Image (tube, rainbow, N blue to C red):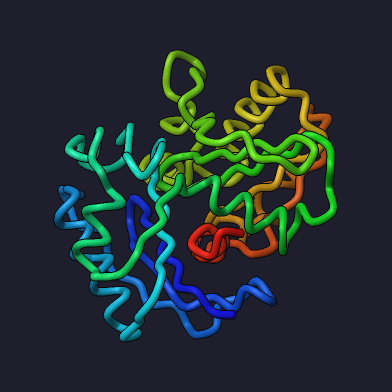
């Protein structure tokens, strides 16, 4: 069974048909740059371009980098503030002419990792973190998702944690891997103190380079492993949501 998934990020909008039997992309994904400013209409145009690249007809699952409840986007940390309280499901469905399911981006990635990836079979408290333009989070207990946790906005040294420990922070400040790993360590220790997870799954594009920073992280008791689906997890999770899985 194939369903289309789209992952809206702070830097790119990417999507592809997904084989839901295997939890893999059925075709090579197509990506466009996220427009700036990332207004609802300009982002909707980007989503339409990605979906149109495949001439897709049928349900589409779409992730959003913020809180989503009932198809309404409630926050907008790394996109235009015009998204706040927007009926994103209706907007995107009208723009692409297909039925749309929309959910938080990290929740989508987390569900994909728990079903097909690094979290498969784990029943304790598991936290999936996506490090990118911001920090997304998906919290699972007993295999069940606690949606819209947004742990990237926990305060760390007087700032949103994602302003200190995201991949964007590393790039913007030209941090070395050891320096950045120290910041990620401080963040993980803070999250661990609050939630006592058994496992951290580290996702986002930087998970492809996990060997450069995960071994440098100390003083965290929970097991830490890179995401298996890496930066495709959001696309897979979005398609799963559109299929009602």
Residue located at (72% from left, 59% from top): 115
Q: Position of residue 189 (x, y in %)?
A: 69, 24
Residue located at (50% from left, 74% from top): 3
Give the quadrant of residue 147.
top right
Identify the image quadrant of the C terminus: bottom right
Task: Looking at the picture, tell me which residue is in the foreground, 198 or 183.
Answer: 198
Q: Position of residue 37 (x, y in %)?
A: 15, 48
Give the quadrant of residue 53.
bottom left
Task: Looking at the picture, tell me which residue is in the foreground, 153 or 54.
Answer: 54
Looking at the image, is 199 positioned above or below residue 206?
above
Residue located at (55% from left, 55% from top): 206
Task: Looking at the picture, tell me which residue is in the foreground, 72 or 10.
Answer: 72
Q: Is residue 150 left or right of residue 168?
A: right
Looking at the image, is 192 positioned above or below residue 235?
above
Q: Position of residue 9 (x, y in %)?
A: 37, 53
Looking at the image, is 110 positioned above or below residue 136?
below
- Count of numbered badges drawn on the protein: 0
Residue located at (34% from left, 61% from top): 12
Q: Position of residue 19 (x, y in %)?
A: 59, 78
Identify the image quadrant of the N terminus: bottom right
Q: Is residue 228 left or right of residue 82?
A: right
Q: Is residue 46 left or right of residue 237?
A: left
Looking at the image, is 30 positioned above or below residue 112?
below
Give the quadrant of residue 243.
bottom right
Task: Looking at the picture, tell me which residue is in the foreground, 110 or 223.
Answer: 110
């Amino acid at each position: 069974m194939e369903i289309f998934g789209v992952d809206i990020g702070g830097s790119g909008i990417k999507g592809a048909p997904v084989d839901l039997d295997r939890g893999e992309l059925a075709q090579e994904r197509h990506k466009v740059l996220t427009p700036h400013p990332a207004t609802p209409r300009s982002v909707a145009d980007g989503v339409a371009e990605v979906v149109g690249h495949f001439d897709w007809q049928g349900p589409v699952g779409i992730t959003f980098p913020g809180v989503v409840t009932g198809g309404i986007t409630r926050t907008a940390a790394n996109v235009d503030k015009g998204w706040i309280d927007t009926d994103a499901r209706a907007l995107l469905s009208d723009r692409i002419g297909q039925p749309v399911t929309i959910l938080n981006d990290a929740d989508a990635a987390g569900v994909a990792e728990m079903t097909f990836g690094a979290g498969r079979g784990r029943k304790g408290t598991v936290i999936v973190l996506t490090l990118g333009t911001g920090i997304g989070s998906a919290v699972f207990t007993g295999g069940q998702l606690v949606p819209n946790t947004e742990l990237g906005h926990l305060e760390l040294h007087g700032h949103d944690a994602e302003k200190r420990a995201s991949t964007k922070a590393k790039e913007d400040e030209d941090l070395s891997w050891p320096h950045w790993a120290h910041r990620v360590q401080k963040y993980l220790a803070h999250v661990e103190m609050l939630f006592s997870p058994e496992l951290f799954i580290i996702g986002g594009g930087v998970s492809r380079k996990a060997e450069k920073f995960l071994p440098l992280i100390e003083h965290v008791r929970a097991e830490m492993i890179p995401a298996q689906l890496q930066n495709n997890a959001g696309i897979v999770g979005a398609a799963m949501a559109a299929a009602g899985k």
